[in-house]
Image (cartoon, rainbow, N blue to C red):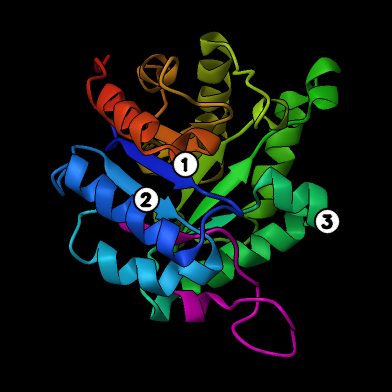
């Protein structure tokens, strides 16, 4: 089993001072060392300041998005090279909110993955189906398309540095979580897709995370699910008490 990974996506929440306070308190509560690999994704404005504080911890720093070019006339965008320079080790790519609100396509996501890898960032590649796609029985068709286009042209040497997060769109921020059986089924399907495209050892090494209304009530059951290597947490990670509790519960998982 791969190492347990817990990613906190704070989305558009938290000023610089609020971010620094949260990280400082979090590190104190966890005594700077955890069994899990904890990755924090604050807003862009907090990244540089957060990196300074995170140097004293075992936590990793992630950006919530990046552009697919290293530089150029792209007003308002952020290059993965810039992110790497200020200390990011990870970047979230293809989140459903980016796809829904900003029109990101599978092809765009694929280009971002390749540029992030070229900048020595670990992409956290988000995939997932909408409620309508699930209701029409197209979940696995959607996942296959997102993976194929997202990883198109990616050599085996690069894919080993990837994290994939299965986030059913209908579960994000709704309080509704996929049943354990569905999580296991879709994670197994994703791993098999990677194995067919590359090979089984490569597929087994890629961490697969689950995201979508993860909280302290369901996290332990989720991380104990076969083929689940961790979670991508949204709103629940904004509360210090809730997030510390979630990390401790996840770390107490029984390995099957």
Q: Is residue 98 left or right of residue 84?
A: right
Q: Which residue is mark 2?
A: 39
Q: Is residue 103 left or right of residue 111?
A: right
**Of discs 3 and 1, which sits in the foreground?**
1
Mark 2 and mark 1: span between their CA atoms? Answer: 13 Å
Give the camera-side residue of 107 and 251: 251
Q: Is residue 149 left or right of residue 253?
A: right
Q: Residue at x 26, y 48 (%)?
A: 25
Sequence-wise first label, 2 or 3: 2
The picture places residue 112, in percent across and down from the top left corner, at 62, 65
**Of discs 2 and 1, which sits in the foreground?**
1
Give the camera-side residue of 29 and 42: 29
The picture places residue 5, in percent across and down from the top left corner, at 34, 40
Element type at mark 2: strand
Mark 2 and mark 3: span between their CA atoms? Answer: 26 Å
Give the camera-side residue of 145 and 247: 247
Element type at mark 1: helix
- Local packing at callout 3 (Cα closer than 10 Å; few below 14, some 14-19, many 20+) is few
Residue 148 appears in the rendering: yes
Is 78 within the magenta?
Answer: yes
Q: Point out the stretch of residues depicted in magenta.
A: 60-83
Residue 90 appears in the rendering: no
Q: Which residue is mark 1?
A: 238
Is 158 within the magenta?
Answer: no
Q: Quadrant of the N terminus?
A: top left
Compared with residue 191, is residue 202 higher up or lower down, i.e. above or below?
below
Q: Quadrant of the C terminus?
A: top left
The picture places residue 104, in percent across and down from the top left corner, at 77, 57
Q: Residue at x 27, y 38 (%)?
A: 3
């Amino acid at each position: 089993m791969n190492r347990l990974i817990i990613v906190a996506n704070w989305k558009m929440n938290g000023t610089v001072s609020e971010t620094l306070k949260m990280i400082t308190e979090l590190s104190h509560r966890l005594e700077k060392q955890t069994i899990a690999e904890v990755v924090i994704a604050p807003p862009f404005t907090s990244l540089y300041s957060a990196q300074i504080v995170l140097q004293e911890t075992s936590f990793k720093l992630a950006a919530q998005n990046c552009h697919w070019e290293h530089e150029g006339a792209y007003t308002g965008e952020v290059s993965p090279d810039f992110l790497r320079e200020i200390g990011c080790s990870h970047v979230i790519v293809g989140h459903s909110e980016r796809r829904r609100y900003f029109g990101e396509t599978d092809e765009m996501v694929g280009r971002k993955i390749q540029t992030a890898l070229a900048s020595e960032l670990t992409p956290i590649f988000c995939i997932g189906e909408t409620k309508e796609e699930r209701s029409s029985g197209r979940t696995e068709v959607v996942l296959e398309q997102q993976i194929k286009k997202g990883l198109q042209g990616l050599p085996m040497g690069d894919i080993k540095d990837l994290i994939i997060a299965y986030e059913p769109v209908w579960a994000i921020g709704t309080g509704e979580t996929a049943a354990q059986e569905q999580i296991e089924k879709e994670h197994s399907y994703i791993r098999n897709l990677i194995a067919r495209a590359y090979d089984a050892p490569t597929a087994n090494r890629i961490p697969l995370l689950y995201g979508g209304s993860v909280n302290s009530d369901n996290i332990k059951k989720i991380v104990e699910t076969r083929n689940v290597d961790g979670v991508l947490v949204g709103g629940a990670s904004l509360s210090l008490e809730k997030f510390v509790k979630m990390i401790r519960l996840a770390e107490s998982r029984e390995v099957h």
